[in-house]
Image: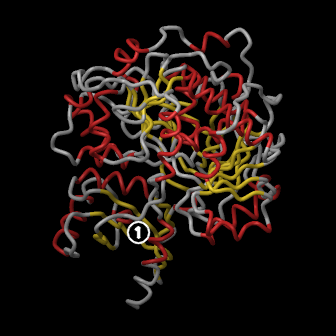
């Protein structure tokens, strides 16, 4: 918690925080109408339109300390303008350049909490031509060691410096995040930037590693710029928008997809440390856009007081990073009157497809159409292959894995299985590695999961394949329930209902009831852990 507050406290001490007086405002007042009372009405993005190029430093309006437009809102009393953010980032630029001698192409590994300081560190790294490497601060020391040894950073900024001091043999500078913020407070800001070419790397983002060792995806400036421009157009972002940012800051979804749309348009961001239902309920009436993972929406739906009175000011709900069930989509629309816009993306490509902005163009169960300027196709085995300007440049120091994941004509092999309807809408059927072959027949977990959701008898489901002496693999459903006990009667009832919509070989051989499903930091169910946990289920019964 202390690392979340230092940067703001420092700004307060310099008297540079702009106060926003919330107490006199109606609870459902759209925040953009409030902000125009205390900020300039000039769109920042217009200052750069004549000279914009395909790198992040030229597109994010931090070249001036004079703008009074609100950039970030932290809570009811604390916010900073784009001018204040520019100065803050400029102090980090000076510090990284003069003391730590960060050079173009060198890596900065951020094992930091989500706060103003981590945002300034990221933006300053980009302005110096460095490569930012975000990792989850909750990773163990053993997990962190893999990233340190793989990316070989020049600077490791850590919220756990005591444990990270052990990495001095690999890293020139291991610096405590709070200490770095104190050093930045004494630095004179600079608004100069290193020349950055569009093809230069902006970040190395590691894959989640749910099916193996995490790999570093090399992401370029021009790729992120193209993706942000595409989403701004598709999702109709303007400088009047207020984004409710609840996502982690160590992942493509939170760091690029959501944040760049706001920074590019000079709009405002409610910058909260993490998702919590009560906190989201509090801030939703003051925002116009929310991006999240399906878990966020399912948790909100558990609240009886969540509905149209809370969401009236939201023009766009976006879901990604994990599959959104059709049942949740329909129930959310019924409760709020808003259709969630589901999209499809991954670390290696950012956003690939999106449902249409018009609500009649949002199809439950589909992740939409490929972004304009991109190409998407299915291989003979149904695997999704994509070619977009936002594609990553390969895996860091891993040419063999890079070659394995691209076709001869340059398409990236996603590893996801899908189907495309006659209008070009994509439907995800699951990961290729998750596909179950039971008795010689292909079973797609997503189809079974959707069918179980349709019964409305469980909260959520993960379908896996487990070793079976007769079938090779048996279909097993692990269902999250409010009840703690294995209910054989309920299991039989669910199976009977599934027979109405599924052929016999797709019916789970076993349904296991649990309190909750294991997830990673982005809300993806960790099926690998479930397979390990129940690996011997049928083998022991023989």
Q: Is residue 477 visible?
A: yes
Residue 281 sits in which quadrant? top left
Residue marked by disc 1: 475
Going 57% across and 69% down the picture, which residue do you hit?
Answer: 140
Q: Is residue 323 left or right of 151 when viewed as pictured?
A: left
Colouring: secondary structure
Residue 393 sits in which quadrant? top right
Give 246 or 420, whichever is nearer the viewer: 246
What number of labels is visible?
A: 1
Q: Is residue 266 left or right of 227 when viewed as pictured?
A: left
Give 59 or 376, whichever is nearer the viewer: 59
Q: Is residue 349 visible?
A: no
State the image coordinates of residue 51 (x, y, percent, origin top left): 74, 12
Q: Say above or below: 524 vs 511.
A: above
Q: Say above or below: 315 vs 126.
A: above
> What secondary structure is marked by label 1?
strand
Crowding near the residue tagged with mark 1, few <14, some 14–19, many ≥20 C-alpha atoms within 10 Å: many
State the image coordinates of residue 194 (x, y, percent, origin top left): 81, 30
Going 58% across and 51% down the picture, which residue do you hit?
Answer: 178
State the image coordinates of residue 328 (x, y, percent, origin top left): 30, 44
Going 61% across and 45% down the picture, which residue do you hit?
Answer: 181
Q: Say above or below: 313 vs 323.
A: above
Going 40% across and 28% down the picture, which residue do you hit?
Answer: 289
Q: Is residue 364 left or right of 194 when viewed as pictured?
A: left
Which image quadrant: the C terminus? Answer: bottom left
Q: Say above or below: 471 vs 230.
A: below
State the image coordinates of residue 101 (x, y, percent, origin top left): 82, 45
């Amino acid at each position: 918690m202390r690392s979340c507050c230092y940067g703001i406290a420092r700004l307060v001490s310099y008297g540079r925080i702009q106060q926003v007086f919330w107490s006199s405002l109606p609870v459902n007042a759209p925040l953009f109408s409030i902000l125009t009372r205390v900020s300039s009405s000039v769109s920042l993005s217009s200052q750069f339109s004549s000279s914009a190029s395909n790198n992040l430093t030229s597109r994010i309006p931090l070249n001036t300390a004079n703008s009074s437009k609100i950039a970030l809102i932290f809570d009811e009393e604390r916010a900073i303008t784009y001018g204040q953010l520019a100065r803050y980032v400029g102090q980090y630029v000076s510090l990284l350049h003069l003391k730590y001698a960060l050079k173009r192409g060198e890596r900065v590994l951020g094992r930091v909490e989500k706060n103003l300081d981590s945002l300034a560190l990221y933006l300053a790294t980009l302005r110096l031509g460095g490569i930012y490497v975000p990792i989850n601060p909750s990773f163990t020391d053993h997990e962190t060691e893999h990233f340190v040894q793989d990316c070989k950073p020049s600077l490791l900024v850590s919220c756990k410096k005591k444990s990270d001091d052990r990495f001095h043999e690999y890293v020139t500078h291991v610096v405590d995040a709070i200490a770095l913020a104190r050093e930045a407070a004494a630095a004179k800001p600079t608004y100069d930037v290193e020349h950055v070419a569009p093809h230069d790397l902006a970040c190395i983002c590691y894959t989640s590693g749910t099916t193996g060792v995490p790999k570093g995806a090399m992401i370029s400036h021009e790729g992120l710029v193209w993706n942000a421009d595409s989403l701004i157009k598709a999702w109709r972002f303007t400088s009047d928008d207020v984004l409710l940012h609840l996502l982690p800051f160590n992942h493509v979804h939170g760091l690029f997809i959501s944040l760049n749309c706001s920074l590019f348009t000079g709009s405002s961001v409610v910058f909260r440390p993490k998702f919590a239902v009560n906190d989201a309920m509090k801030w939703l009436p003051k925002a116009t856009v929310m991006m999240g993972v399906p878990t966020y929406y399912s948790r909100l739906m558990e609240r009886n007081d969540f509905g149209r009175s809370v969401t009236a000011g939201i023009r766009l709900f976006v879901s990604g990073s994990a599959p959104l069930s059709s049942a949740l989509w329909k129930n959310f629309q019924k409760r709020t009157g808003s259709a969630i816009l589901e999209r499809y993306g991954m670390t290696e490509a950012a956003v690939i497809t999106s449902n249409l902005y018009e609500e009649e163009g949002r199809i439950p169960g589909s992740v939409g159409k490929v972004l304009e300027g991109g190409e998407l196709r299915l291989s003979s085995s149904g695997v999704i292959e994509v070619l977009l300007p936002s594609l990553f440049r390969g895996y860091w120091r891993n040419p063999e894995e890079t070659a394995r994941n691209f076709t001869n004509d340059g398409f990236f092999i996603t590893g996801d299985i899908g189907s495309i309807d006659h209008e070009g809408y994509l439907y995800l059927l699951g990961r290729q590695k998750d596909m179950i072959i039971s008795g010689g027949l292909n079973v797609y977990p997503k189809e079974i999961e959707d069918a179980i959701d349709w019964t409305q008898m469980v909260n959520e489901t993960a379908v896996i394949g487990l070793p079976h002496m007769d079938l090779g693999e048996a279909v097993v459903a692990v269902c999250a329930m409010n009840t703690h006990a294995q209910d054989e009667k309920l299991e039989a009832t669910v199976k009977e209902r599934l027979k109405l919509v599924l052929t016999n070989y797709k019916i789970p051989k076993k349904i296991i009831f649990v309190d909750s499903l294991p997830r990673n930091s982005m809300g993806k169910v960790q099926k690998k852990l479930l397979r390990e946990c129940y690996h011997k289920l049928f083998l022991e019964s023989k």
